[in-house]
Each structure stands twice: as C-alpha cells, then as structure tokens.
Amino acid sequence: MTEADEWEAIGRALRDVGVDPSDFGRFVNHEPVMFDSTSARPVLLEWLPKAEYPSVKEAIARRLAETGRSSATAQALLQEYRMSSDENVRWALADSIVRVAPSTDLAEIVELAADRNGGRGRQMLVYALWRVPSDRSREVILQLLDDPEVAPHAMFSLRRAFGSHEARRRLEPLVDHPSERVSSAARDALQRIDRSVTR
C-alpha cells in the first residue's frame, strides 16, 4: 500500500462512520478546520497501529489529541510511542499523550521521559513532568536539566515543580554548561524567572 492508498483507506473508513475526512490531515493556524475528531476516534484508534507512513501516523496522533482525556486513548498512544523509531512521529505521539492522559497514566509518562534513548521525541513528556506530583517525577526533572535534547522542557517543569527560588539555584550552575543548548536554555529560563519576579 502506498502512502496515498493509506490516506484514502482511512478516508473511506471515516466516511463509513459518517465523518467527513476532507480536513483530516489539514492543520493550519487562523483558518477554520472542520473535522469531527470525537466521532472519528474509533477509526483513529483502529488505524493508529496499522498506519505505516509517518505523515499518516502523525495526523492520527494529532487528531486523537483533540478527543479529550481517556486512559484507553492514552494507552494506545503510549504503545505506539514505545514501538516507534521515528523521532518526529514519537514527538507527535508524546504531545498527544500528555493532552489525553488522565492522572492514572502519568506514572508511565515519567518513565518514558526519563529514558534518554527517546531523544528529542520525548520533549513534550518532559514538558509535562511538573503535572505529576511524585518524588520520582521531581527526580527525573533534575536528572534531565543537562540533557541537550530536552533541557528547555525540563527547565519549564523545574520551575513549576520546585518554585522560582529553587529553580534559580539549580539553573545558575548550568549557565556555564559545556553544551551550548543547555547553557542557552538555562540563561533563557533565568531571564523568564527574573521577568516574572519583577512583574
């Protein structure tokens, strides 16, 4: 099956359940997009593991993010995240996971965020770590502050989980980190803290 065939097959499946597929893969800013993600959810969940092409899988993930919090949806996305080797697909899956995962699934997000083999694909998981009220989550945030792939996202969670004063204490040594991505992220985070304090 070619990529075009895959898009068409999903389109047929959507039409079969009464969903107009015209805007399924259309994501634009400041323009109306008419796609009923909620009604399409059963088809999207069916096709999530079946889709072979990255663009199709990313579109499915992004539409599932619009369907509301659901453990079933989160678990389907988590399974695909673990199986995916495409960093862009993994990023889209991670972004959708944090949008739909209820509190019961947050512990799994922490462990996936901690796995450095996930590369930049886990950025949005790290971004959401502050939402998990656990010692393990706080530990992972601290461990990832010097990870160039996710440092800005860990620093975002740091401030929300630890507060501005403690975040500043943790960030100041990283300004001189040998990785430019880490040191730059630390400087930016410190500037944001300073701006918030002076407001």
Image (tube, helix red, strand yellow):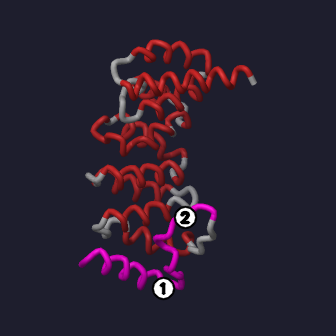
Image quadrant occupied by the N terminus? bottom left
- Tell me the distance, in whole angstroms, between the alpha carbons under discs 1 and 2: 22 Å
Label 2: which secondary element: loop
Q: Which residue is label 2 attached to?
A: 28
Numbered range of the magenta stretch: 1-30
Find residue 57 and report its image quarter. bottom left
Q: Disc 1 residue type?
A: Arg
Front in this rendered view, residue 121 or 31: 31
Reply yes or no: does residue 22 show up in magenta: yes
Q: Is residue 112 magenta?
A: no
- Mark 1 vs mark 2, foreground winner is 2
Quadrant housing residue 168: top right
| Residue behind mark 1 | 15
As helix, strand or loop, the secondary structure at mark 1 comes to helix
Residue at point 35% right, 52% down? 88
Whole-percent x, y for residue 71 in the image: 49, 55
What residue is at 37 percent from the left and 68 percent from the top? Answer: 56
The foreground one among 82 and 36 is 36
- Amino acid of disc 2: Val
Find out whether the residues at labels 1 and 2 contact each other: C-beta distance under 8 Å.
Answer: no
Residue 40 lies, with reference to residue 191, above or below; the image says below
Left or right of 8, for residue 159: right
Q: What is the x, y in percent for residue 112?
A: 37, 40
Expressed as whole percent of the image width and height from the top left, the position of residue 125 reads 45, 42
